[in-house]
Image (tube, helix red, strand yellow):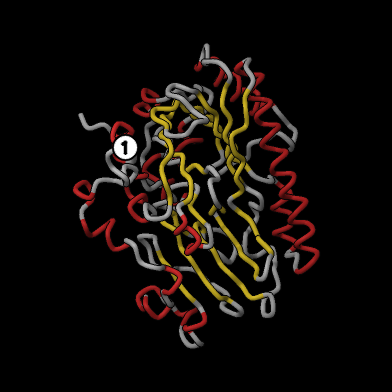
Amino acid sequence: MEDKNKSYIDLDKTKKKKDSDEIPKEKFGYGIGEPYGREDYSKREIEDYPSMRGEYFIGGNYKERKFINLSDKPLNANINKKGLKRLILLPDHSPGRGKLPVGSVAVYSKEEHIPTSEYLGPDIGCGILLAKFKHPLINLKYSNYKLASRLRASKKELGSLGGGNHFIDFYEVSNSKSPLFKKRDQLVLIHSGSRLKGKEIFEKGLKGLEYLEKYKEVNRFGKENRKELLKLVEECVEDKTDIILDNIHNSLEVNDDFIYRKGTVKLKDDELGIISSSMGENAILITPKPSLKQLEFSVCHGTGRKISRGEAKEIYFDSEEIRKKICIPSIIYDENLKNEAPFCYRSLEEIFPRIKEFVLVKGILKSLSHVCS
């Protein structure tokens, strides 16, 4: 049987093979990985991608607005092009609420653009916190059942998980090139955001300085919320953790320009990131290569949806097989899982060839359990 871990990283050959973190060409073929090879993406223009333009890019000075599409789908969104300097679609690109699709980076000129709540949508400050348990988990099934029960019973906003694709997953390190981890270390991954506070800002349609102030406030709440969820996890497993990272992937950076990252994470230097996959599948730990600068130091946080939640509702789903593979508490029914089932998402094998020139794989995590609302 093929070892899936070798799809991303072959730790036994790191000294012999410089690019040991890349997926073998023979597995995916030239047509998928190589077109995204060693080009300088910062020099690509919108008009280099005529099939991706769409009606909202017809006309105007394309030489000043660079467009990159690393996904398997064309742009399908009502993008405001006034002041738009760059638009990047990462491999997890999919439609989302607000004026920007999920898995995108949009750079707007400060002279021509006023930031508003419409761009990031309601899930401001959404992020992923990764923490390492200090000791091996004693009873995975009971701990997850207790966690799911406590989340369901809680009426507080701070320390709540939220719906959609927000989750708490446990992992075990399969392989690692990072000094932070050794094989069989166990981790928890918490994916949650600013809850109703972000939704309130989105619905009010805040703009300018008022939006920027509320954005900072809500971001702080999102981080505190993930820390509260981590405390709950520690109580349920009766162990302490060390936080490894807490990366926001719905953010607005303000410098010489406005940089929106929707569903994308900013990574610089040796910062550690994680890309999770569909329910029950591996996640990978990554660090940026220097070439990530060409993508505004931005990388995807997940593999991205293949089909919408509406389409997922029409597909028959039985969780029996995935429950054999990982621990999912019995109080989480199939109707809670269906919209986020594995068939709804791309795989790591699908997206990794499109970003392998920009990131180094530092480790592989095996999924142990899944808890959602």
Question: Dot 1: what SS?
Answer: loop
In the rendering, at what x and y percent does residue 306 appear? Answer: 39, 52
**Mark 1 residue crowding within 10 angstroms, few (<14) / some (14–19) / many (20+):** few
In the rendering, at what x and y percent does residue 150 appear? Answer: 65, 23
Name which residue lies at 75% across and 54% down. Answer: 216
Residue 158's image quarter? Answer: top right
Residue 372 appears in the figure = no
In the rendering, at what x and y percent does residue 277 appear? Answer: 42, 41
Residue 128's image quarter? Answer: top right
Which quadrant of the rendered structure holds the C terminus?
top right
Name which residue lies at 56% across and 75% down. Answer: 85
- Say if 119 sits above or below 299 in the image: below
Residue lying farthest to the top in this orientation: 138
- Say if 138 sits above or below 95 in the image: above
Residue lying farthest to the front in this orientation: 15
Which quadrant of the rendered structure holds the N terminus?
top left
Which amino acid lies under the numbered mark 1 shown in the image of this protein?
Lys
Q: Is residue 191 left or right of residue 218?
A: left
Name which residue lies at 47% across and 49% down. Answer: 309
- Say if 54 sits above or below 356 in the image: below
In the rendering, at what x and y percent does residue 144 appear? Answer: 55, 21
Q: Is residue 367 left or right of residue 201?
A: left
Residue marked by disc 1: 15
Query: In front here: 359 or 218?
Result: 359
Name which residue lies at 19% across and 48% down. Answer: 26
